[in-house]
Image (tube, grey):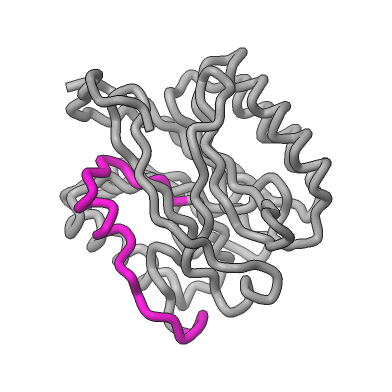
């Protein structure tokens, strides 16, 4: 067994990249974790009206910080490919390289006003650990957020060997969703026998409606942040690591 140290950041997300980037860089520079997870679209802001050049420059700055401070970051960002906009988690390794990306596969009906669904569910291998990424509604396919089928993406990732699912969230403060979101995470962790690490954005409208924290494969919240305000957790997860697995 090896300990994987994970930090999840619950931070306010401005509509302006110039407000968000310094905060992301500050967390990276102070991190002593192996992986640091940020909320959904925490770099660009939650919208499609971002400048491509500014985003690409920010990715480069984040990569340089990851390399300098030896941490792998999972960045919530908007991105554009072939003229289409996506909601993305971008995985930048401790060496500053791009391990891969996950594009949100089940955007809400509101998301689809500015973005397209992603096309592929991926697993990643890094330092002998297999993991996957999901973004907000990918996990729970919330009723009322669009008439979309539930592909049970967490179950698919578990069947593919994922040991951890990194779940970047920006779900707001509507407390009617809290029981559904949090029981959903617990049940999916149990079903798929994975750890689920979440990082939600601070809501200006009140307490977050899904905790920022870590759920065990037994369905226990091992740690979590307070529901209000900017916080971060750091937690060591004990995993069987196979250093002979090739990085993907």
Say which quarter of the image contains residue 182.
bottom left
Which residue occupies the foreground of this view, 64 or 237? 64
Residue 56 rendering spot, x and y as whole percentages: 75, 38
The C terminus - image quarter: top left
Which residue occupies the foreground of this view, 206 or 153? 153
> Residue, x 36% and y 27% (percent of image)?
247
Instruction: Decide whether residue 92 is among the magenta residues.
Output: no
Instruction: Decide whether residue 166 is among the magenta residues.
Output: yes
Residue at the limit of the structure toward the front, as seen here: 82
Span shown in magenta: 144-167
Say which quarter of the image contains residue 161.
top left
> Residue, x 55% and y 31% (percent of image)?
98
The N terminus - image quarter: top left
171 w.r.t. 37: above or below: below
Residue 214 rendering spot, x and y as whole percentages: 34, 44
Residue 181 rendering spot, x and y as whole percentages: 39, 67
> Residue, x 45% and y 36% (percent of image)?
233
Please give left or right for residue 39 compared with residue 123 in the image: right
Residue 185 rendering spot, x and y as whole percentages: 32, 60
10 w.r.t. 175: above or below: above
1 w.r.t. 229: above or below: above
- What is the number of callouts on the image? 0
């Amino acid at each position: 067994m090896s300990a994987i140290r994970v930090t999840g950041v619950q931070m306010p997300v401005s509509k302006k990249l110039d407000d968000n980037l310094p905060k992301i860089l500050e967390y990276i520079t102070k991190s002593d974790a192996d992986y640091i997870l940020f909320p959904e679209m925490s770099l660009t802001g939650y919208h499609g009206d971002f400048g491509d050049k500014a985003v690409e420059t920010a990715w480069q700055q984040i990569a340089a910080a990851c390399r300098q401070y030896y941490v792998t970051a999972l960045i919530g960002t908007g991105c554009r490919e072939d003229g289409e906009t996506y909601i993305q988690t971008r995985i930048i390794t401790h060496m500053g390289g791009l391990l891969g990306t996950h594009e949100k596969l089940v955007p809400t009906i509101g998301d689809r006003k500015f973005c397209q669904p992603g096309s592929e569910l991926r697993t990643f291998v890094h330092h002998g650990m297999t993991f996957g990424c999901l973004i907000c509604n990918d996990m729970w396919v919330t009723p009322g957020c669009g008439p979309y089928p539930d592909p049970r993406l967490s179950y698919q990732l578990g069947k593919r060997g994922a040991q951890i699912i990194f779940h970047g969230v920006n779900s707001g403060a509507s407390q009617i969703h809290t029981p559904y979101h949090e029981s959903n995470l617990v049940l999916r962790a149990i079903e798929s026998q994975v750890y689920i690490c979440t990082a939600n954005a601070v809501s200006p409208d009140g307490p977050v409606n899904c905790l920022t924290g870590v759920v065990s494969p037994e369905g226990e919240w091992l740690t979590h942040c307070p529901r209000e305000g900017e916080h971060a957790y750091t937690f060591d997860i004990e995993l069987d690591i196979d250093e002979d697995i090739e990085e993907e």
